[in-house]
Image (spheres, rainbow, N blue to C red):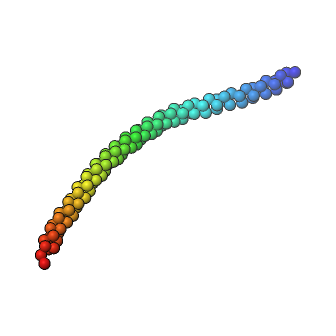
Amino acid sequence: MDRDSHSEDTLSTMVLENIKNKLIDAFRASGECRDDTREDVGTRARQLSLSRSQQANEELRRAQIDGAITWLRSELLEMRSQDLQLAKTLLGLNTEIQRLRRESFGGLDDTGDDQP
């Protein structure tokens, strides 16, 4: 029975050693993962910060572009208004010129009819 007990002890010792080694390896791996995780968290935080900064810059750039587009629209509307006013003025002047020509040539025609 001593032999059986000795072999059981040896077997138990081997199993316990195996479990111990697995636990040690597991803790080493998790410790390395934690270190990697800490580094990853720092890197991710920096990346997030850069990403947010880039996002803020992009939003600012879009806001500036939107402001420039709004200004251009208002300028174009003002130019259109001035263009319409100028067109009305030119049409009025043309109408007045045509009226004066008719009066002028009409007067000559009338004087031309009176002379034989």
Residue at the far bottom in the pictured view: 116
Q: Measured along the vertical axis of the image, is residue 114 above or below residue 16?
A: below
Instruction: Please report the residue visible at 83 percent of the width from the left and 22 percent of the height from the top.
Output: 5
Figure disc tally: 0
Q: Measured along the vertical axis of the image, is residue 112 above or below residue 98?
A: below
* Quadrant of the snapshot with the C terminus: bottom left
Q: Quadrant of residue 53?
A: top left
- The residue lying toward the viewer, choosing from 57 and 81, is 81
Image-based side of 48 in relation to 14, left or right: left
Residue 81 visible in image: yes
Instruction: Please report the residue visible at 23 percent of the width from the left and 60 percent of the height from the top.
Output: 95
Instruction: Please report the residue visible at 85 percent of the width from the left and 24 percent of the height from the top.
Output: 3
- The residue lying toward the viewer, choosing from 93 and 1, is 93
- The residue lying toward the viewer, choosing from 75 and 40, is 75
Q: Position of residue 57 (x, y in %)?
A: 38, 41
Q: Position of residue 30 (x, y in %)?
A: 60, 31
Q: Position of residue 69 (x, y in %)?
A: 35, 47
Q: Position of residue 90 (x, y in %)?
A: 23, 58
